[in-house]
Structures are given as structure tokens and as C-alpha cells.
Image (tube, rainbow, N blue to C red):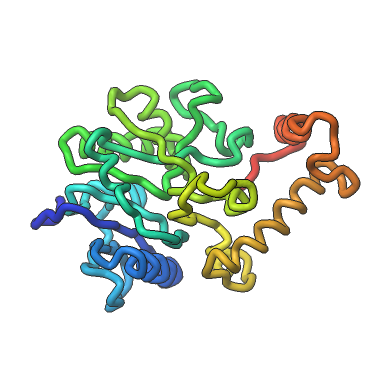
Amino acid sequence: MRQAGTMREGVIYVAQGPDYLDLAIQSAGSLKRHNPEIAAEVFTDQPCDSPCFDRVLPIPDGPTPKLACLPESRFQRTLYLDCDTVILAPLGDLFDILERFPLAVAHDVRRTSNLIREGGDHDTPYAFPQLNGGVILYRDSAEVRSFLLNWQVQYRKLARKRDQVSLRDLLWSSDLRFYVLPPEFNLRRVTMLDAWEPLDVRPTIMHSHRLLQHMRMGDVRLSTLAEVLPAERIALAEEWDAVLGPLAAPGETADPTERFSIAEAGERSPAQGPSDE
């Protein structure tokens, strides 16, 4: 059941377990630094008295904690954020997208990988990739609530761990209008900062698995863009070295796009398992 007392705009997090709650507090802290007027709420199974949150709520029953919580937002306009996010700038007029579209999401990255090309009930074109489920902007309406509940149904039906497979299925078959956010609102590849020119973008939301590496791999904890960016630069060089060899650096071939074809051919190889994003 949705929470009583709707508010106009707000951000929600879903944090199961103490480690994810710690990350949610970190993300909400960055949100409040840049957007002190925006309410933030967390659904969690942990005790929490952080001043970063305006309300702390229990996680309801559902197929996953996130899918269970999305329909429960009390905001008229909701921005859902994964816990591994950091707000880099004011959100500005982001919520105004919802005046025209009931839902907004961003494309996922690594789009030629087996992981992101995984399908469900529908065989969608490459140009209609999975949408990343870590940054979701949606408005309160009967249409959207129905969509979110159908997402739970489709997730259970497909029985896939990643909810993005069922999300793409529903968006492909649904009449729900949605908008694709530009990458600065779901910055998965922070090395894009090295390529963008002045006045190209306003980097706003970093969403990086590097913020989870201390939990998943026992590695050093990274918490800021200044810490994540050099680590991603190193990882990018290492990935291309693994595909092309250390003597064939990106940009040294006559056709700069050829290296992407080589990488995709390796992913399609029977010996190559699905990549993890």
C-alpha cells in the first residue's frame, strides 16, 4: 500500500543490509549538498537515524526489494537512485521531464555484451537496448503504478536475476510513453569526462560499480568522482589491452571502429561467457 501524505518531488533509495544502507547515506549526503530542498527517503531493513533522510521506511514484500518499493513512493514525482550513486551537481529541472513523459530512464552500457543483450519474451532490435535500472524518474499516476506492478509480474515470469530484462520487455510491448535520459544523468562510464568537450554536458549523477568494490572484492573503498575516475582510466586501458594486446593501443589502427568489432566477436565466441556489468 502506498504511503499516505503525498509530496511533490523526492528521491527514494532501497537499501537492504548495512553495507547498502551505508552507501545510500553517502549518496543521499551528496544529494543534499547540491539539492538541500529535495526530500530523500530510504526503504531499508536496517535501523537508520541519518539526517540525510526525511523518512525511513520498511521494505515491503515483493519479488525484489527495489521492485517492491517503487510503487510505494509517496511523491508525485519520484527519482529512484541505486545506492552506488553520487550526485555531482544540482538536479536542476530534471523533474520537469515528467510534465511530458510519465517515465524516464537511461540506456545501459556495454550494449554488445551477452549480459545486456539478454532477452525475455521479446526479441528486440539492438537499437532498443536494455535500460539501466539504477536511475529511474517517474510520476505518480494510475498508468505508471500499473506499469510498475506489471514489472513485478514480468520479473517473476522470466525468473531472471537482473530486472532490466523484464523492464525492456515491458517497455517494448507497452504503450507507456517514456524518455531516455542523456548519459550525464546516469554516468556509468566516468571516462566519458575525458572525451566530452566544453559545454557538452553538465555531469549530474555518477552511477558506478566502483563504489561497491570494497564490498564485492574486498578492495579499497572509493567514494568520490576524484577517486573513481583514475581507477576507471586504468581499467579501460586494461580492458583494451586484453582485447587487442598491449602493442595495439586504441586509436593506432587505420579504422578506429575495428577494435569494437574485434571485442564483439570475442564476446560472441562460444568460449566466452557473459560479461558482468
Residue 146 x %, y %: 21, 35
Residue 275 is at least partly visible in this image:
yes
The answer to whether residue 65 is above or below residue 132 is: below
What is the tally of numbered marks visible in this picture? 0
Seen in the image, is 199 located left or right of residue 63?
right
Which residue is rendered at x = 45% and y = 37% of the image? 131
Residue 88 x %, y %: 45, 61
Nearer to us in this view, 230 or 83: 230
Which residue is rendered at x = 55% and y = 64% of the image? 225
The answer to whether residue 207 is above or below residue 250 is: below
The answer to whether residue 257 is above or below residue 162 is: above
The answer to whether residue 250 is above or below residue 73 is: above
Which residue is rendered at x = 49% and y = 47% of the image? 201
Q: Which residue of the protein is positioned furthest toward the right in this rendering?
A: 247
Residue 25 x %, y %: 37, 70
Image quadrant assignment for residue 114 = top right
Which residue is rendered at x = 9% and y = 56% of the image? 4
Nearer to us in this view, 225 or 122: 225
Q: Which residue of the protein is positioned furthest toward the left in this rendering?
A: 5
Nearer to us in this view, 185 or 177: 185
Image quadrant assignment for residue 273 = top right
Seen in the image, is 144 located left or right of residue 31?
left
Nearer to us in this view, 275 or 139: 139
Residue 43 x %, y %: 28, 62
Residue 83 is at least partly visible in this image:
no
